[in-house]
Image: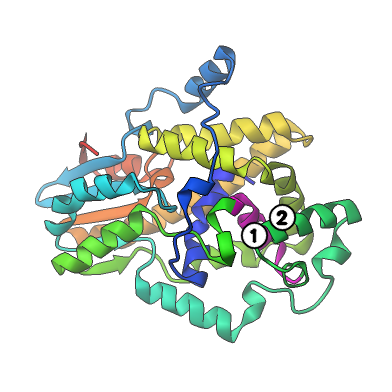
Amino acid sequence: MPMRFVLSLALLLVCLGGTAAPARAACAGQDLIPALPEADRAALRAAVGPSAYAAGNHWVARRGTTEIALIGTYHLYDPRMEAVAERLTPVIAGAEILFVEATDTEVEELQQTVARDPSRLFLTDGPTLPEALPEEDWQRLSAEFRARDIPPFLGAKFRPWYVAVLLAIPACLTEGGQPPRQGLDRLLMDRAAAAGVPMQALEPWDTALGIFDGLPFDRQIDMLRASLPLAGQSEDALATMEEAWFREEHRLIWEYSRFVALSQSDAEAGRLEADFAVMEEALLSSRNRAWIERLLPAAEGRRVAVAVGAAHLSGPAGLLPLLEERGFDLARRPF
């Protein structure tokens, strides 16, 4: 599973657990891209391609009297985001509405649903993880649970896809069993609330959960096992993707995830490429197309802002290309 994808689901974990903020000083990951051989860095640049939309975390789209400010966020908190949020405050305060992936209303719906129906995250029948995994994998997974202050007996009952998400979040961000603090999305939502700007979700509250509901158990186990070897590298993965985001190279984040998967997995390259295509369609492209259909009627003739994960901006069906196809003029803005 692409590391960028599972990190993008950090918002889901925060929604389920609160907003406590562990000390970032405990994380000691390194940005791995500068240390790559030049041939690998050249391959990454080639994979990103020449698209003008592959970089830039702040864009404005205009068509007639409609103006849409698009801000590509990162869902996990970094203190450096405070300055970014401060610079973007006039953009948020000047909007008639702020569109986000999930407002507090959707968060509450999600919390209540999981409380009523634990089967959305927990295994309520069939084999538990110790029964479904080889013993070596279960022992390794148990150690990862303990590093995150999750009792293995509890983790044994998590759905495998949910465990894959948990493993992508470094233990340094979940000290004391607390979830990671929300990132730029929350900072901008707080500023919208302070300015009296209404907020609206771009999708129903259960979209993230629904992506996995239809996955067969065996496929979820494959995802979990694929994530285990990378769990010990999650701090470096986090630092690598964060630094790329601060450089506003959001498409590079996705392509780096593809590069890591292809270079470190024993699976056939063709299968991995197919997996990436399926994941990009499910998590980015299909959602982007649905968001556009919800956004444009509500934005017609207005000045609005959109703050969503930066991975949604570019790519074959990114928000920026989709808006261009619909006759919008696009301009990159300072971030």
Q: Which residue is drawn at 71% across and 60% down?
A: 145
The image quadrant where one finds the C terminus is top left
136, above or below 115, in the image: above
| Label 2 residue SS | helix
Identified by mark 2, the residue type is Glu
Q: Is the magenta stretch mostly helix, strand or loop?
A: helix
At 39% from the left and 22% from the top, the residue drawn is: 50
Residue 41 in the image, given as x and y percentages of width and height: 53, 19
* Circle 1 SS class: loop
Residue 298 shows in the view: no
Q: Residue furthest bottom?
A: 116
Amino acid type at mark 1:
Arg
Q: In the rendering, which numbered label is found on residue 144?
A: 2
Q: Where is residue 98 in the image (x, y as percent from the top left)?
A: 24, 61
Q: Give the crowd class for mark 2: few <14, some 14-19, many >=20 residues within 10 Å.
A: many
Residue 257 as seen in the image, left or right of residue 322: right
Q: In which quarter of the image is residue 183?
A: bottom left
Residue at the disc numbered 1: 148
Q: Is residue 165 above or below residue 248?
A: below
Give the residues in magenta. 157-171
Q: Residue furthest top?
A: 38
Classify residue 319 as left or right of residue 32: left
Q: Are marks 2 and 1 in contact (CB under 8 Å)?
A: yes
